[in-house]
Amino acid sequence: MTGAPLLDKARAELGRVFGFPGFRPGQEEIIGATLRGEDVLAVMPTGSGKSLCYQLPAMAREGLALVVSPLIALMRDQVAQLRELGISAAALNSASDVNERRRVAEALRDRSLRLLYVAPERLVRDDMIALLRNAKIDLFAIDEAHCVSQWGHDFRPEYMRLRDVAEALGGVQTIAVTATADGPTRADIVARLFTRRPRIFVRSFDRPNLFLAMRPKANATRQLADRLEAHKGESGIIYCASRRRTEELAEEFSRQGRRALPYHAGLDHQARARNQDEFLQNDGVIVCATIAFGMGIDKPDVRFVFHADMPSSVEAYYQEIGRAGRDGLPADTFTLYGAGDIALRRRQIAEGDAPDARKRVEEKKLDDLVSLCESARCRRQVLLGLFGEEAEPCGHCDVCEGGVRLIDGRLDAQKAMSAVLRTSGRFFFGHLGNILAGKATDAVRQYGHDSLKTFGVGRERTPADWRGVLRQLLSAKLIAHDPSDRDRLVVTEEGQKVLRGQETFSLREDVVSKKPRRRGEAFASPGDADADILNALKALRTDLAHRQHQPAYVIFPDRTLIEMAARRPRNLEELAAIHGVGIAKLQKYGAAFLAVIQSHADA
């Protein structure tokens, strides 16, 4: 069976096993290409169903997919969810005991396994490759494929050997998936992972259910606490730049009556695992974490992701906020940034061991991130623009909602662009800021820039202020990096219009401090969902999850419970029509959840 018949079978399995009424945007094309035997690179936003793009082909073909996954927690959760659906799946990693390894070996011999998750460190071992050669792998799936790129933010050296594994397995068909890969990273993935030229699918990076907000730091702890008021009883992540900060915030928020836990690489393994399991298996838990927490987190009902400190890059920011709202329901993101964050990151880049070319890339990525933070334009427009997408103002970020005060910035823009032109675009924001503010540094004097007409033309602002103005010009596309020479700034056609006085330009002055709306109230019980029924369904889910030592969402995600509480199915047939209720879960849990709904109907 090939082509269309296999796709029809995959579509049937989507409804019968997973309980989904149809493919999400982009999935059908990717799965169709995979079922035709093509190698595939799929770049899809978090929460868009990347995993199904290799899980369904394995089921439709009744073959074996080998899945490389970077974290044990991610493997554990995916295997648990697949088994709940009645799909034969297993994992091999450092946590696998002798009995589990024996069971996997037997399942490989009798071809009863559909998906085998393996850590990259184990996969490159000779004994593992010998075992898999005999097992006949039908599909080689590489999750979090951006980890192979040295230009990405999650580089893993062991990923560099995965193409050798594919060749050792006889040039097996390969599908690589990731949520974050700009143009250079995609090129790196293709060159390093594939033995043949793959079909490349790039879905929109937009996550319209995420509210995007950023603020300059004032009192970070108070700002975060105020924002948390809109999320009582909800699960979320607060990212911090240091281990100490995670513990301080967790302690402070615990004192305020919230369930807040720290997570960082300095905690012993048991404490990390305990805190992660608490977050995964229960509602209303806040994790204050370093970036050590996250890639393996597949919890769909994370309602907010906050940053107590500025992330390291736009890619890192996108990956981290992408852990919110994976169920498609509204979720909140809120990022604090400050001059200290920016200065620290610049110092880390300058003092690092990376070659100069890499440092220039890192500097450019930092400028992009700060432009996003300080932009007077729609956050989503700027963010998607950094990934090469055009977008209209979203109406769903703090800028679009009027949370940023704007002033007439045409004169400041003209001064800044004049400084760019008079220095031939060969100097970046720090040097230009010193020229505009009239600060005669050694570098300014060395190049004779203290004699320029623009030297000191903006003495009313500090060099740091002018760097902010220049970043806003970059964000608004009035200036840009020359495509043929990344070390040179140019004034764009739009910038020339402002320079000649033909167009106006607004600058962001500051951020209006206002109490955030209680966004959680908009979707805690959407539609006709009965709050009492929803709470009772969640209580049943929690009880089942605890008894099975599973995360709650493995039983049913919030979206499914909300739909149950809204539609109130009266029998198994009606329950089967609920999103996310496949045949295995219907048989296993259907009667219990129907009983809860019926008990409230009788009350």
Image (tube, grey):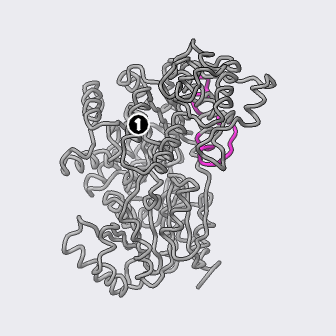
Q: Which image quarter holds the C terminus?
A: top left
Asked if residue 76 lies left or right of residue 21, the reply is left
Q: Which image quarter holds the N terminus?
A: bottom right
Q: Residue 562: in sight, yes or no?
A: no
Residue extent of the magenta highlight:
383-403
Question: Looking at the rendering, which quadrant does residue 78 occupy?
Answer: bottom left
Q: Is residue 150 above or below residue 360?
A: below
Q: Residue at x 52, y 62 (%)?
A: 188
Question: Looking at the rendering, which quadrant does residue 510 occupy?
Answer: top right
Question: 179 or 115: which is nearer to us?
Answer: 179
Q: Residue at x 31, y 45 (%)?
A: 279
Residue that numbered label 1 is attached to: 345
Q: Is residue 222 above or below residue 575?
A: above
Q: Position of residue 338 (x, y in %)?
A: 43, 26
Question: 526 or 363: which is nearer to us?
Answer: 363
Q: Position of residue 516 (x, y in %)?
A: 49, 24
